[in-house]
Image (cartoon, grey):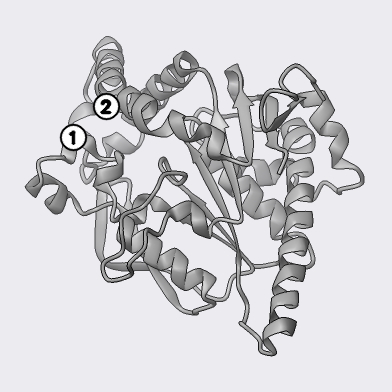
């Protein structure tokens, strides 16, 4: 563990090798075949990455989950009644193209293999984006992914219901192909042990809930928070590479919202991706996403190749 920041920040900083030693005896429960289904576009996961980074993290989370359950049991003893199954909620934030979804899928797979919490649900905040018709009506379709493009009140309500042990919760379905909410389709969240919520702005504040008399924030409902980080220039490169891959795959589908980009030449596609990055995604990263980094309990700092190089863990 590095001491260069230990006395000046609320974080402990670990190199990859230092973090890896905290795995202890945590068993590797994933195979090379599993990684094929977990990695994202243009990412090449290795078992070394799982062993060095994610097994220690799954051990930390398992310990935290056990501690939260003990606290819940203590409250139930004090109250003389049971509150029902309250899921442990993990929030994952970070830029577009930084690998949040991959991190979420890896944790979902690992945590579901621990004996005490086999049901792990994954919810993306994309389902809480306002429909394109609403964004267009407000003149902010070009700011999709910015805080104002989300139904923050709906997200807070969902998390509040989740932590109130309500069952049968529904999250609106989002289609990346259509780039929009899918009317009449829902993701059912039913009695999970753990819920992983991933999204660009998951560590930001929410809106005042009408009639509540207080301000409820999304982070108030999160038991553990992660921020997936990298230098902006590296993320920009990943974004451009992903755009080129999508041009040759998903964009070819005539139903794709971005089908118009499928016929772009390499040079034109790179130019378009860099324009979208500089005018939209970079702005959102600098103004809204990056400022929430230090609110996370754990920061995963990536280098090129999507390999985690450094980790920062909040002391308390």
Query: Which label belongs to residue 142?
Result: 1
Which residue corresponds to the image point at 28% horizontal and 35% vertical from the top-left?
251
Q: Which residue is situated farthest in the right direction here?
A: 25
Q: Position of residue 293 (x, y in %)?
A: 52, 33
Instruction: Give the residue at the far bottom of this rendering.
Output: 80
Residue 279 circle label = none
Relative to residue 87, is residue 77 drawn left or right?
right
Q: Quadrant of residue 226?
A: top right
Q: Relative to residue 11, is residue 160 depicted above or below?
A: below
Q: Can you say which quadrant of the picture contains the C terminus?
A: top right
Packing grade of label 2 (10 A; few <14, some 14-19, many >=20) is some
Corner quadrant of residue 222: bottom right
- Residue placed under numbered mark 2 in the picture: 280
Q: Residues within 10 Å of mark 1 (few under 14, many from 20)?
A: few
- The one of 257 and 156 positioned closer to us in this rendering: 156
Label 2–label 1 contact, CB within 8 A: yes
> What is the quadrant of residue 181 in the picture?
bottom left
Q: Residue at x 27, y 71 (%)?
A: 211
Judging depth in this view, the residue of 229 and 268 nearest the camera is 229
Between marks 2 and 1, how big is the CA–CA gap?
8 Å
Q: Residue at x 63, y 41 (%)?
A: 297
In the image, residue 306 sits, relative to residue 256, either above or below, namely above
Q: Quadrant of the N terminus?
A: top right
Q: What is the residue that sits farthest to the front in this orientation? A: 213
Side of 161 where 194 appears, left or right: right
Q: Secondary structure at mark 1?
A: helix
Report the side of 185 relative to 76 (left or right). left
Whether residue 96 appears in this view of the structure is: no
Q: Residue at x 47, y 35 (%)?
A: 292
């Amino acid at each position: 563990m590095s001491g260069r920041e230990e006395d000046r920040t609320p974080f402990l900083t670990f190199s990859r090798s230092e973090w890896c030693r905290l795995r202890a005896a945590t068993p590797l429960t994933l195979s090379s075949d599993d990684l094929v289904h977990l990695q994202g576009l243009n990412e090449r996961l290795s078992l070394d990455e799982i062993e060095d980074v994610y097994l220690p993290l799954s051990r930390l989370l398992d310990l935290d989950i056990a501690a939260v359950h003990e606290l819940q049991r203590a409250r139930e003893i004090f109250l003389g009644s049971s509150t029902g199954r309250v899921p442990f909620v993990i929030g994952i934030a970070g830029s577009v193209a930084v690998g949040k979804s991959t991190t979420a899928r890896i944790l979902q797979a690992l945590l579901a293999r621990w004996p005490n919490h086999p049901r792990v649900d994954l919810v993306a905040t994309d389902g809480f984006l306002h429909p394109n018709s609403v964004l267009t009506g407000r003149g902010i379709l070009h700011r999709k992914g910015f805080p104002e493009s989300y139904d923050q009140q709906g997200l807070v309500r969902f998390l509040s219901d989740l932590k109130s042990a309500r069952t049968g919760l529904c999250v609106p379905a989002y289609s990346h192909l259509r780039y929009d909410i899918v009317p009449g389709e829902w993701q059912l969240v039913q009695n999970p042990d753990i819920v992983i919520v991933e999204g660009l702005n998951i560590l930001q504040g929410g809106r005042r809930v009408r009639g509540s008399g207080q301000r409820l924030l999304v982070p108030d409902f999160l038991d553990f928070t992660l921020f997936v980080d990298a230098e902006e220039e590296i993320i920009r490169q990943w974004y451009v590479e992903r755009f080129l891959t999508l041009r040759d795959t998903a964009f070819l589908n005539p139903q794709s919202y971005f089908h118009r980009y499928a016929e772009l030449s390499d040079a034109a596609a790179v130019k378009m991706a860099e324009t979208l990055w500089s005018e939209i995604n970079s702005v959102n990263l600098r103004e809204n996403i990056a400022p929430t980094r230090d609110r996370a309990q754990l920061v995963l700092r990536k280098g090129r190749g999507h390999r985690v190089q450094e980790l920062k863990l909040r002391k308390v």
